[in-house]
Image (cartoon, rainbow, N blue to C red):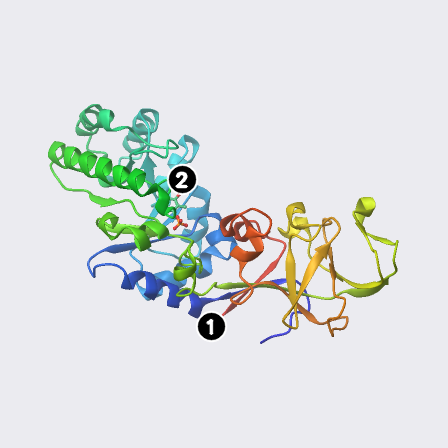
């Protein structure tokens, strides 16, 4: 293992391939796989992840916003790319860079048809999104007839797929709710198929949908968090490998006497003599204030070292009393062994928020290309 001399996020592409293979093993061989690589591939490196997914056989990629897709096209990624939350201002970019928009409202539908016609497009692939219970984005079931009427009046666009998104696929207490979403999506799919002259492909499941609802795989699945190594449940976490390791090193060690304090606002006060280590990572790097005052626990030589006091913008201080370590030694914030979901859950948040929040100031290192 390389010793970190500054704060780095190591991204292991072998682990990505492992997770992809595991998730694929849960699917029928004909089911297509979309790698969700929005938000810098969940805070890692969207280009490196896209290129690896393309190499190992993913069928589709998706991003949240058009500019994220432009980054991938600029890097030479050829796979089809779905823009999950397309915005009217980016329609020209979407068409110019061969990205595929999600059409989730009548406003988006009419505006995209205008853009596609302006660009002289025929059968431009679009994806209709339906709301089946998340109440975030999407047409409702009762919109089907009206939108198909609009679509049938133009040959500038073609419905490549229809999809919806599960609200609670990781929560087995919400099984009935999820099954209702699946049933509702199935009804919508039948109506759309009956109303069009071709059969668009269907997709519904995110990572937990893949793992918990095999009946919801349809023609394609959309996986994000699973690819990055988290299964939202212990029995799946065991089968996946977190692809990133956030590591740093000890800048300075202090002895803190009883009644002395550490950090801003004197948030930590020593009750006995302790040793503290100052680390070059702070809330500007993605370790937010919620991790201060003992919530975040880093790992030094395999021993837990809790954050003491408030997190600063560029630094945190941790309690290293009793740990045999020196200035310059490596510190693991999270990785395959001390996992990001555990780190996040101690501060009442989730792996998704922690990993996507690692800021662009942290250098990315790709290993096992
Ligand atoms: C982010 C996202 C996903 C991926 O979800 P995971 O839980 O990370 O697998 C899938 N579909 C949509 C619409 C999303 O926004």
- The residue carrying pointer 2 sits among few (fewer than 14), some (14 to 19) or many (20 or more) residues within 10 Å by Cα, namely some
Res 154 → quadrant: top left
Q: Quadrant of the N terminus?
A: bottom right
Q: Which mark is residue 93?
A: 2
Q: Earlier in the sequence, mark 2 or mark 1?
A: 2
> Which element type, helix, strand or loop, lies under badge 2?
helix
Q: Which residue is mark 1?
A: 368
> Which element type, helix, strand or loop, lies under badge 1?
loop
Front-most of residues 1 and 183: 183
Residue lying at 71% horizontally and 72% vertically, measured from the top left = 329
Left or right of 266: which side holds 65? Answer: left
Q: CA distance from mark 2 to mark 1?
A: 33 Å
User: What percent of the width, then of the height, locates residue 349?
Assistant: 55, 47
Can residue 158 be seen here? no
The residue mark sitting in front, 2 or 1, is: 1
Residue lying at 41% horizontally and 33% vertically, measured from the top left = 87
- The residue carrying pointer 1 sits among few (fewer than 14), some (14 to 19) or many (20 or more) residues within 10 Å by Cα, namely few
Whether residues under marks 2 and 1 lie with C-beta atoms below 8 angstroms apart, the answer is: no
Q: Is mark 2 within 8 Å of ligand 1?
A: no
Res 9 → quadrant: bottom right
Q: Quadrant of the C terminus?
A: bottom left
User: What percent of the width, then of the height, locates residue 110?
Assistant: 30, 26
Left or right of 328: which side holds 100? Answer: left
Residue lying at 33% horizontally and 60% vertically, measured from the top left = 23
Residue lying at 43% horizontally and 41% vertically, measured from the top left = 65
């Amino acid at each position: 293992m390389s010793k970190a001399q500054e704060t780095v996020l190591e991204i292991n592409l072998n682990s990505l391939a492992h997770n992809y293979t595991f998730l694929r093993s849960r699917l029928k061989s004909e089911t297509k796989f979309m790698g969700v690589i929005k938000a810098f591939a969940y805070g890692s490196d969207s280009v490196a992840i896209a290129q690896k997914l393309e190499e190992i056989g993913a069928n589709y990629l998706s991003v949240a916003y058009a500019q994220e897709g432009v980054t991938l096209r600029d890097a030479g990624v050829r796979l089809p790319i779905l823009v999950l939350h397309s915005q009217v201002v980016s329609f020209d970019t979407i068409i110019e860079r061969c990205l595929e928009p999600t059409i989730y409202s009548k406003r988006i539908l009419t505006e995209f048809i205008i853009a596609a016609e302006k660009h002289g497009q025929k059968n431009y692939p679009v994806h209709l999104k339906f709301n089946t219970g998340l109440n975030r984005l999407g047409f409702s079931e009762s919109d089907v007839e009206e939108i198909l009427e609009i679509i049938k009046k133009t040959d500038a666009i073609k419905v490549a797929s229809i999809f919806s998104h599960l609200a609670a696929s990781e929560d087995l207490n919400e099984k009935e709710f999820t099954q209702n979403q699946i049933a509702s999506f199935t009804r919508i799919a039948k109506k759309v198929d009956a109303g069009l002259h071709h059969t668009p492909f269907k997709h519904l499941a995110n990572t937990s949908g893949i793992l918990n609802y095999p009946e919801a795989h349809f023609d394609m699945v959309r996986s994000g968090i699973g690819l990055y190594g988290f299964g939202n449940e212990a029995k799946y976490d065991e089968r996946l490998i977190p692809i990133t390791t956030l590591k740093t090193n000890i800048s300075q060690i202090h002895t803190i006497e009883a009644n002395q304090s550490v950090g801003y606002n004197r948030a930590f006060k020593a009750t006995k003599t302790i040793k503290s280590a100052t680390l070059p990572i702070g809330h500007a790097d993605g370790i937010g204030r919620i991790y201060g005052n003992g919530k975040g626990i880093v790992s030094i030589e395999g021993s837990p070292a809790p954050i003491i006091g408030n997190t600063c913008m560029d630094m945190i201080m941790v309690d290293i009393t009793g740990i045999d370590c020196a200035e310059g030694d490596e510190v693991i914030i999270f990785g395959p062994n001390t996992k990001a979901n555990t780190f996040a859950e101690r501060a009442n948040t989730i792996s998704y928020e922690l990993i996507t929040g690692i800021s662009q100031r942290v250098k990315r290192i790709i290993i096992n290309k």
